[in-house]
Image: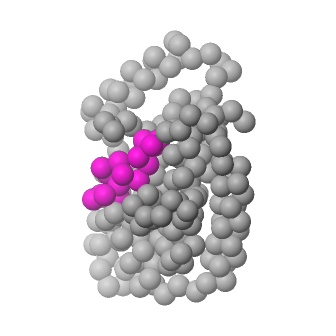
Amino acid sequence: MGQPQARLYLGLTAVPPARLIEPVAEVFGDLDTQIDGRWQNPVTKKSQFMGFHRLEQILWDEPSLTGATALCQGLMDHEEKLVALVSKARYSPQEMAAGATDLINEAATSKITGEEERYSRTDLVDFDANMKASMKVAGMLSPYLRTVDPDLVSLIRQRNDAVQRPGPRGRRRARRRSRSTARTRPASSPPPRTGWRSAR
């Protein structure tokens, strides 16, 4: 797998499933940091910078793939450990709700600045997975929520629909991108990268 293919795989295939379990994965502290810790948030020692974001840095910001193989193996080991822990864990409704709420708040305040995927700029993929994860939790809790505040369930759905629905500018850009891609992209080429770029 070359560097362009590795970029597509990491940004569009490997990372989103991890974002889907963020509401529960973050309770595992050090393991979550080993998988998803960002440089200076909370990782401050280079020897402890590993996982998705270190691989992201190598693929987008460094001239070679030196060290990537060992990092991939370490990431797989940590992910397998996380799967084992999650499958045995028991969560209270309060923990699930708090995790989903924190995730939405983080997306709206810090992730929106681009600091999460600072090298690849595939932030929109993260946002989509985070929203799906939070709405999954909301769906699991909705039977209880209907008994205490039926209007809240409708409000959550309305706001999720509003986030997922592009505005007029977004629809125009999507149509232009679709027409441009159809004219210029060979049938055998990989799909275009998803995400946005901001100034470094």
Q: Quadrant of the N terminus?
A: top right
> Looking at the image, which residue is at 41% across and 46% down?
118
Magenta span covers which residues? 107-123
- Which quarter of the picture shows residue 93? bottom left
Q: Does residue 108 show up magenta in the picture? A: yes
| Scheme of image coloration | one colour
Between 63 and 138, the one lying in front of the other is 63
Question: Where 110 falls versus 200 (above or below)?
Answer: below
Quadrant for the C terminus, please.
Answer: top left
Q: How far from the left and from the top, in percent, is residue 129?
A: 48, 55
Residue 67 left/right relative to 143: right
Residue 98: % across, % down: 38, 78
> In front: 133, or 114?
114
Where 179 sits versus 164, above or below?
Answer: above
- x then y, percent, for residue 173: 35, 27
Which of these two is toward me, 137 or 30? 30
Residue beneath the point at 51% across and 68% down: 33
Residue 161 visible in the picture: no
Across and down, in percent, residue 171 comes to 34, 31
Give the vertical position of 140 relative to 199 (above or below).
below
The image quarter in which residue 191 lies? top right
Q: Is residue 190 visible?
A: yes
* Residue located at (56% from left, 34% from top): 63
Q: How many marks?
A: 0
Query: Is residue 197 a member of the stretch shown in magenta?
Result: no
